[in-house]
Image: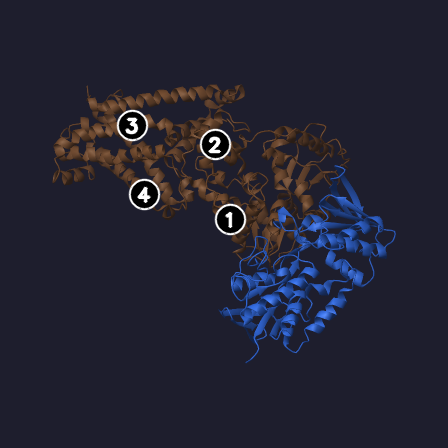
Chain colours: A blue, B brown
């Protein structure tokens, strides 16, 4: 008898990890990825929190794993049609003409980072020295931080909650990882720019993971990062192409105004276009924040309302890497139980 | 002397109604401010009175504004208004020709067919009989449409029709009975005694063929008189109070009495002049996008009038003015809503002392971006480029320490707090010594025009850019972009600026006409005035509005308000949303 086959959409962290675990459990896997290489959003990162490990190390590990003989990787292609014949039979057409068949479907379509130009008051795309946290990772990879005029920045501001927890954008959810990312990036900035003033504008610092709170404290005590509780109201640009920001320091209760040489927007997570497409194609219900709604928030985090269709990673909600990897393994387990007909929870 | 006891119900009803109306209106008019009364007296004997008469003819009788909504609906209202009016007037003339005395009792004309022996001819009696039948037929056809509208409102151009109180439904039934009963009374009389014309005469013969019309006609006149009497008695307590009130309101309006921000006697006239036609219901995006069905002006005014709880409706309005624009009675619906909002903040002169008074360089042209302008730096950048290209020296009033124009506070009812902000800004603007004040924000524009009392030319940047182009100071080249223009509520409907944006867009792009052009534009959902709906509801509203515009497949959706731009841009979409200044700057 042929081994049973699982189709996975998205070869990011969750997709790769789940594919490897399923392959090891004796299933064959069709892994579909829209980019040329697997890795997803991890490919844009330089260092990871909380241990400051190189992101490339994890990336290489994931890429090695998907070389498993039971995994067939389809890169640079996206599905154009998904057919669900019954709970255990799926056919998928790809835009390169290939047709895949499987006995279960795993959606690992991840997230997209918030398009900062939608929050026009921060001037992204208009002011030269406003960048996003994703672009800053790129700067770190090149080990060089310069302003648009080629100077070493003397004052840098990191702006939290850009596109997260923002009623006006109707993104009510917390993207979870930006707080700790800002702490990590502020430390990396300090290492490259020992004399610069580094400020972080926040609403709350949500240090939920192991070692995060310690890192936050270290950032204040050892790295001399200033944390200002207050949300930016607006930004403008002066003649020297510096960013002039207005905000209220809500702990002091005073409005403040300052000039930044570089402003970094900590962009949040939104449901990816891929998630939205798959959800529409398979009629998966979406949570109010646009992410795919899991079957149950406790017992069936990897199942969806459609039997045989599973979900893992940031397609369901914002997660850090640790949780994404755990969620992918959990999904592999759930799919295995489903295909072997010994599900525990109904 | 023509008299019969059956006229009593009619006469009692009519007299009581007249006394009630006179007493009520006199009481209201007496509560006008001294200034208002003075204005009335000054304008009473002037061309304005004639203008009011013309408006009464066009609106109260012909209902010509309703024709804009739907010709069917207009015809229906005209049948009742103009029809009934003609029935009274032609009937009166007919009775005069017959009786030759001006002082025949009022019931004589109304019940003419009863009192006039059919065999007695008088000059043109056939013509009159024909005319009266024709008018009655017209009213009956309107009535048939009204019945039809209750059943299938959509076919008459209204998606939704007003939900009425049981009492109003009772009087509606009475009203609908009046004309069929008159038709029956006249037909039965004609069937037994002759007379009438093509309608009542033929019907009379028809009824006589199978009914004892001889004995039915007299009771039918009793019924007709009673229905009229009951209608008159119920009228002051029903929505039909709008019939007399609208006419008085039209006079007062033409004589120059204005609705201010407080609820005054003129507000009372408006409250009672609302006919509850329900035309505002379809205009309201809170209804069409969010399914809210109690906040539309027709229901809001109804609740005020009948002392129901309307606290939620006070705050739940976008003040986009779409209802006001469509209102056939020309009521100031936004100001009426605003008049109910309470002043509640405790802002004093000292609240804003932490903001230093800005030092503004002098120039002939002053630019004010506004708070919303500062939230859309792209608009400010475009305006800077355009000023530079046109070689205009300008001073940027709120570049550094800008203060809000005050409108958000006014829209929430807080006029006292707003007046403090207004005073600070006004000083800054006057100190600049400018002759022209250009603003990017239609919200600021409205406030500058209405509340600042500035003795200088105030222009929205759309008007200013149009002027720069026509003066030859800007030379934009026409691009191939297909543009759809969303006219902001405060700019188009609020200030009537519909031409300038079109001129500008035609110069730089290929504008696509839509059914939302000019004053028919939609609200983007960003409204500062709504203090009730949630951000999620706002998003749904703006998504619906955006999709309505995008259904015309533009390359760019253009607007002229930073708030509209921000509101639309928060939705994740492939079509870019730009300010008109940005489009011009890109093509200069």
Locate residue B68 relative to residue A312 in the image: left or right: left
Mark 4 or mark 2, earlier in chain: 4
Q: Nearer the viewer, mark 4 or mark 3?
A: 3
The dot on residue B230 is 3
For the N terminus of chain A, the quadrant is bottom right
How far apart are the alpha carbons under marks 3 and 1? 45 Å
Could you tell me which residue is drawn at 63 percent across and 67 percent down?
A10
Task: Characterize the local packing of mark 4: few (<14), some (14-19) or many (20 or more) Cα atoms within 10 angstroms.
Answer: many
How far apart are the alpha carbons under marks 3 and 2? 29 Å
Q: Can you say whether B21 is above or below B295 in the image?
A: above
Mark 1 or mark 2, earlier in chain: 2
x and y percentages locating residue B290 in the rendered image = 50, 46
The dot on residue A283 is none
Q: Chain of mark 1?
A: B
Q: Can I make out residue A10 in this image?
A: yes
Mark 3 or mark 1, earlier in chain: 3
Residue named by callout 2: B309
Locate residue A208 relative to residue B242 in the image: left or right: right
**SS type, badge 3:** helix
How far apart are the alpha carbons under marks 1 and 2? 34 Å
Dividing the picture into quadrants, the one containing residue A258 is: top right
Q: Can you say whether B56 is above or below B525 in the image?
A: above
Q: Chain of mark 4?
A: B
Task: Characterize the local packing of mark 3: few (<14), some (14-19) or many (20 or more) Cα atoms within 10 angstroms.
Answer: some
**SS type, badge 4:** helix
Mark 4 or mark 1, earlier in chain: 4
Are discs 3 and 1 located on one and the same chain? Answer: yes
Are discs 1 and 2 located on one and the same chain? Answer: yes
């Amino acid at each position: 008898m042929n081994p049973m086959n699982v189709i996975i959409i998205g070869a990011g962290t969750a997709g790769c990890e789940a594919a490897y675990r399923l392959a090891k459990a004796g299933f064959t896997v069709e892994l579909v990825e829209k980019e040329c290489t697997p890795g997803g959003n991890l490919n844009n990162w330089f260092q990871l929190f909380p241990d400051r490990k190189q992101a490339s190390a994890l990336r290489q590990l994931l890429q090695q794993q998907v070389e498993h003989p039971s995994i067939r990787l389809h890169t640079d292609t996206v599905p154009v049609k998904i057919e669900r014949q019954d709970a255990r039979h799926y056919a998928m057409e790809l835009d390169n003409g290939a047709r895949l068949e499987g006995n279960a479907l795993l959606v690992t379509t991840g997230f997209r980072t918030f398009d900062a130009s939608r929050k026009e008051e921060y001037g992204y795309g208009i002011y030269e020295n406003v960048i996003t946290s994703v672009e800053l990772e790129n700067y770190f990879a090149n080990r060089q931080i310069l302003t648009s005029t080629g100077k070493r920045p003397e004052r840098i501001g990191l702006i939290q909650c850009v596109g997260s927890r923002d009623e006006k954008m109707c993104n009510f959810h917390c993207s979870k990882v930006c707080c700790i990312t800002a702490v990590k990036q502020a430390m990396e900035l300090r290492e490259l720019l020992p004399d610069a003033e580094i400020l972080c504008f926040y609403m709350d610092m949500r240090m939920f993971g192991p070692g995060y709170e310690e890192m936050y404290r270290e950032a204040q005590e050892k790295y001399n990062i200033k944390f200002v509780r207050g949300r930016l109201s607006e930004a403008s640009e002066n003649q020297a192409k510096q960013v002039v920001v207005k905000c209220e320091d809500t702990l002091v209760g005073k409005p403040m105004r300052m000039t930044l040489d570089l402003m970094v927007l900590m962009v949040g997570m939104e449901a990816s276009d891929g998630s939205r497409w798959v959800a529409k194609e398979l009629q998966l219900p979406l949570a109010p924040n646009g992410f795919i709604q899991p079957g149950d928030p406790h017992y069936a985090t990897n199942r969806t309302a459609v039997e045989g269709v599973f979900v893992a990673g940031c397609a369901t909600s914002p997660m850090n890497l640790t949780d994404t990897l755990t969620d992918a393994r959990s999904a592999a387990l759930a799919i295995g139980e489903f295909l072997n007909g010994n599900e525990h929870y109904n | 002397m023509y008299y019969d006891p059956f006229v009593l119900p009619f006469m009692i009803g009519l007299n009581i109604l007249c006394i009630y109306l006179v007493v009520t209106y006199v009481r209201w008019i007496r509560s006008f401010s001294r200034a208002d009364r003075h204005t009335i007296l000054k304008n009473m004997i002037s061309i304005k009175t004639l203008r009011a008469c013309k408006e009464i003819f066009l609106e109260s009788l012909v209902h010509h504004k309703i024709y804009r909504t739907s010709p069917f609906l207009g015809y229906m209202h005209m049948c009742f208004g103009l029809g009934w009016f003609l029935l009274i007037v032609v009937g009166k003339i007919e009775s005069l020709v017959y009786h030759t005395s001006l002082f025949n009792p009022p019931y004589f004309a109304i019940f003419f067919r009863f009192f006039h022996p059919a065999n007695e001819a008088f000059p043109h009696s056939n013509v009159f009989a024909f005319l009266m039948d024709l008018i009655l037929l017209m009213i009956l056809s309107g009535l048939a449409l009204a019945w039809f509208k209750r059943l299938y409102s959509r076919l008459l151009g209204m998606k939704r029709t007003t939900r009425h109180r049981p009492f109003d439904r009772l009087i509606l039934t009475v009203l609908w009975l009046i004309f069929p009963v008159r038709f029956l009374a006249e037909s039965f009389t004609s069937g037994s005694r002759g007379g009438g014309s093509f309608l009542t005469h033929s019907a009379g013969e028809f009824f006589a063929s199978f009914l004892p019309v001889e004995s039915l006609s007299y009771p039918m006149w009793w019924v007709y008189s009673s229905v009229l009497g009951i209608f008159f008695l119920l009228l002051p307590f029903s929505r039909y109070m709008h019939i007399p009130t609208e006419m008085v309101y039209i006079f007062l309006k033409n004589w120059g009495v204005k609705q201010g921000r407080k609820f005054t006697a003129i507000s009372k006239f408006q409250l009672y002049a609302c006919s509850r036609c329900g035309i505002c219901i379809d205009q309201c995006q809170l209804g069409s996008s969010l399914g809210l069905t109690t906040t539309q002006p027709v229901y809001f005014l109804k609740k005020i009038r009948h002392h129901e709880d309307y606290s939620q409706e006070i705050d739940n309005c976008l003040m986009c003015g779409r209802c006001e624009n469509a209102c056939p009675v020309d009521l100031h619906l936004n100001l009426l809503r605003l008049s109910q909002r309470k002043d509640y903040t405790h802002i004093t002169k000292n609240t804003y002392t932490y903001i230093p008074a800005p030092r503004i360089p002098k120039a002939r042209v002053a630019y004010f971006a506004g708070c919303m302008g500062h939230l859309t730096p792209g608009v400010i950048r475009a305006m800077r480029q355009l000023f530079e290209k046109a070689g205009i020296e300008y001073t940027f009033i709120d570049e550094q320490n800008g203060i809000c124009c005050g409108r958000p506070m006014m829209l929430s009812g807080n006029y006292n707090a707003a007046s403090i902000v207004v005073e600070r800004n006004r000083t800054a603007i006057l100190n600049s010594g400018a002759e022209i004040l250009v603003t990017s924000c239609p919200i600021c524009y409205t406030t500058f025009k209405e509340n600042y009392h500035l003795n200088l030319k105030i222009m929205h940047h759309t008007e200013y850019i149009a002027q720069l182009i026509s003066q030859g100071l800007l030379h934009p080249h026409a691009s191939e972009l297909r543009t759809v223009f969303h006219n902001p509520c405060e700019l188009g409907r609020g200030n009537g600026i519909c031409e300038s944006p079109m001129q500008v867009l035609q110069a730089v792009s290929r504008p696509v006409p839509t059914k939302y052009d000019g004053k028919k534009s939609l609200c983007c959902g960003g409204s500062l005035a709504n203090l009730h709906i949630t951000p999620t509801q706002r998003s749904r509203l703006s998504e619906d509005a955006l999709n309505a515009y995008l259904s015309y497949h533009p390359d760019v959706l253009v607007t002229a308000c930073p708030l509209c731009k921000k509101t639309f841009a928060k939705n994740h979409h492939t079509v870019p949303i730009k300010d008109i200044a940005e489009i011009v700057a890109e093509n200069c």
